[in-house]
Amino acid sequence: DQQVKQNSPSLSVQEGRISILNCDYTNSMFDYFLWYKKYPAEGPTFLISISSIKDKNEDGRFTVFLNKSAKHLSLHIVPSQPGDSAVYFCAASAGFQGGKLIFGQGTELSVKP
Amino acid sequence: DARVTQTPRHKVTEMGQEVTMRCQPILGHNTVFWYRQTMMQGLELLAYFRNRAPLDDSGMPKDRFSAEMPDATLATLKIQPSEPRDSAVYFCASGLGQGRDYGYTFGSGTRLTVV
């Protein structure tokens, strides 16, 4: 039972354009959402997070949007840079579960010069 | 920069052998996770600890996997006996509490190959 789903295994965008990565979840008890970025042969690194009491959080070129009614979140990267090429994982947690992070399958982003 | 240290980085072993992976969490972090990355499942949660006590190990095959924290500076994941289907990259992550503001810090992983 995949509670967090990233339905696009890969995404290719042109440098300077917007990258939009999507994530869906099924568990309505999730109250915190995170995005991680992963380069080959490295561990995932934390990128940005959002609480369920918000619908948007912004950090530089990265913005996460949360639509609770649709159980959907997205990560926007503007403008995209070649160094953003990596696998992006969406993760969710529920407070009553003690911070356990459930991850999606990941989306591989390729930003072409 | 503080980091989570995992050893070994790579391990090749024969089916049936015992495998032990080690993780040194960041000093002061009280929450430790073990994840496994596979092509099909993405990042699967195997087990996690808070203040060295196991909170959830429901993701682990209980008959062959075991996870422990002998002390606050060491977490171990053992597989006995290992099988080819255990081949994957195993990640350890640590953080404070529920990691809500800054997530958890991952190690570089142990790439396990069982032949």
Image: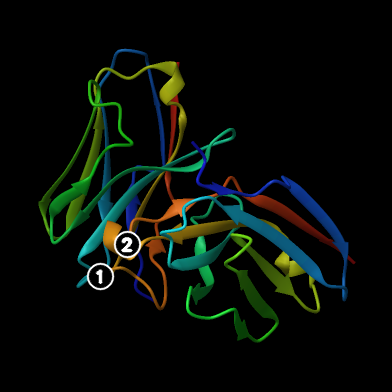
- Where does residue A71 sit, x and y in percent of width and height? 59, 59
Q: Horizontal and vertical percent for residue B21?
A: 29, 39
Q: Is residue B82 above or below residue B22?
A: above
Give amino acid for label 1. Gly
Q: Is residue B99 left or right of residue B87?
A: left
Q: Residues within 10 Å of mark 2 (few under 14, many from 20)?
A: many
* Label 1: which secondary element: loop
Dividing the picture into quadrants, the one containing residue B51 is bottom left
**Residue named by callout 2:** A99
Above-or-below relation of B18 to B22: above
Residue most toward the front? A69
In the image, residue B86 sits, relative to residue B4, either above or below, namely above
Sort mark 1 into few (<14), some (14-19) or many (20+) by Cα contacts within 10 Å.
Answer: some
- Residue in the picture at 34% in, 61% down: B4
Mark 1 and 2 residues: CB-CB less than 8 Å, in contact?
yes
Q: Which of the chains bears the disc numbered 2? A: A
Which label number is shown at residue B1?
none
Identify residue for label 1. Answer: B97
Task: Measure the C-alpha gap from mark 1 to mark 2.
Answer: 7 Å
Which of these two is toward me, B107 or B41?
Answer: B41
Farthest residue to the top: give it: B16
Closer to viewer: mark 1 or mark 2: 2
Looking at the image, residue A82 sits to the left or right of residue A55; the answer is: right
Q: Is residue A82 left or right of residue B15?
A: right
The amino acid type, in three-letter code, at marker 2 is Gly
Q: Chain of mark 1?
A: B
